[in-house]
């Protein structure tokens, strides 16, 4: 079987990262999240300078034209571009699970890409963030809504599309059935989807 | 175990109705879509034909109703209200699968309600509508987009919420893995979700 990539998008506090990790174990493939992608980007030589020299023509936005005078893109854009290159390299190189970083958008239209989304009710997310992640906030509901907003803004800015449209995903799961069972069920879907091709 | 309801929302041509039917068989519970209409027709005093002609049409403007001087709600509103009442009755009476009719919205906030969504790529939906449903259109893509738009308008009008937000659903599945496998996977999720409560 040829390589495949499973992307995992998720609401903050849904346990999506943990599910992605379990899913990779279940499928016996590599696992990448944001931190790891940044590391790989650095190690691969996709430094900000490299990105600027190699990927400018991709950026046709007004933002680009505003920055072209100084030959610089905002740091966040350059990091996104570097990570996108790593994601594309990974796609060509090995089967893996990639959490976040608009990977579904970066690999859009490619074969053997399976997009997943993890949701959870706000009460469950509050409990997870407070009890499992050990994060503290005066008002957890407000805290989560703000986290969501940042995630949505990030996606909508870089992916140039609306976040959380059900049609974008091959499978979405409310993680209230548990991290392990969610990963198991998604693994089952992935196997069926690859077999159906 | 107490009663539960699985709602099925779907893109036109995704095979969602068939999956709902299989799912009901798999779970050994009742299935409602057209049958529900008959129930509504009886309960509301409308003839089946009247309901069929007016069902799922978006309500005409308020101005129009002022113009015709009707003291009644628009027919489509009355049908929606009657259907909602039937859905709530069913929820209290028996376990079942309900396809469409904003059932997820009608039962929002109730325990033991599991919301599902069936998607499929447009190419698969065109093939299904043409080859399985035997529908003919000059341009299938335009035909499907129009069908989707009607469905979205219906949901957005009656449910007063955006259609197809991934967070609304406990599980969504791209049906390209097949009708039977989709139903089997969703049944598995439903069993786990009920067990997790």
Image (spheres, coloured by chain):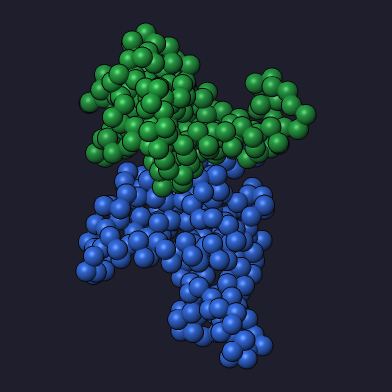
Chain colours: A green, B blue
Give the answer, above or below, for where B129 lies relative to A173.
Answer: below
Q: Position of residue B88 (x, y in %)?
A: 64, 64
Q: Position of residue A154 (x, y in %)?
A: 50, 33
Q: Is there any visible trace of residue A36 in the rendered image?
A: yes
Q: Which of the two residues, A108 or B1, is positioned nearer the viewer here?
A: A108
| Quadrant in the picture for the N terminus of chain A | top left
Q: Which of the two residues, B160 or A156, is positioned nearer the viewer here?
A: A156
Q: Which of the two residues, B139 or B64, is positioned nearer the viewer here?
A: B64
Find the residue positioned furthest to the right. A138
Rendered residue at 30%/31% (across/down)? A58
Find the residue positioned furthest to the front. A69
Rendered residue at 58%/91% (across/down)? B68
Rendered residue at 34%/32% (across/down)? A59
Which quadrant holds residue A146? Answer: top right
Q: Is residue B87 left or right of residue A27?
A: right
Rendered residue at 72%/32% (across/down)? A140
Give the answer, above or below, for where B105 lies relative to A180.
Answer: below
Q: Where is residue A76 in the image (x, y as percent from the top left)?
A: 47, 24
Question: How many numbered marks are there?
Answer: 0
Q: Is there any visible trace of residue A7 in the rendered image?
A: no
| Quadrant in the picture for the C terminus of chain A | top left
Which quadrant holds residue A195? Answer: top left
């Amino acid at each position: 079987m040829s390589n495949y990539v499973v992307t995992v998008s998720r609401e903050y506090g849904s346990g999506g990262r943990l599910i992605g990790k379990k899913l990779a174990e279940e499928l016996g493939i590599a696992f990448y999240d944001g931190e790891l992608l940044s590391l790989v980007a650095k190690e691969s030589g996709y430094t900000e300078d490299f990105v600027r020299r190699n990927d400018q023509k991709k950026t046709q936005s007004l933002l680009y034209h505003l920055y072209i005078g100084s030959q610089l893109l905002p740091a966040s854009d350059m990091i996104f571009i570097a990570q996108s290159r790593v994601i594309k390299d990974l796609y060509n190189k090995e089967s893996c699970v990639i959490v976040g970083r608009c990977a579904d958008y970066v690999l859009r239209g490619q074969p053997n890409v399976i997009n997943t989304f993890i949701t959870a009710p706000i009460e469950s997310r509050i409990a997870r963030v407070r009890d499992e992640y050990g994060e503290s906030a005066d008002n957890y509901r407000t805290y989560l809504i703000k986290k969501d907003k940042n995630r949505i803004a990030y996606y909508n800015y870089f992916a140039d599309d609306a976040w959380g449209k059900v049609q974008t995903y091959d499978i979405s799961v409310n993680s209230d059935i548990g991290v392990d069972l969610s990963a198991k069920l998604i693994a089952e879907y992935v196997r069926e989807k690859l077999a159906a091709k």
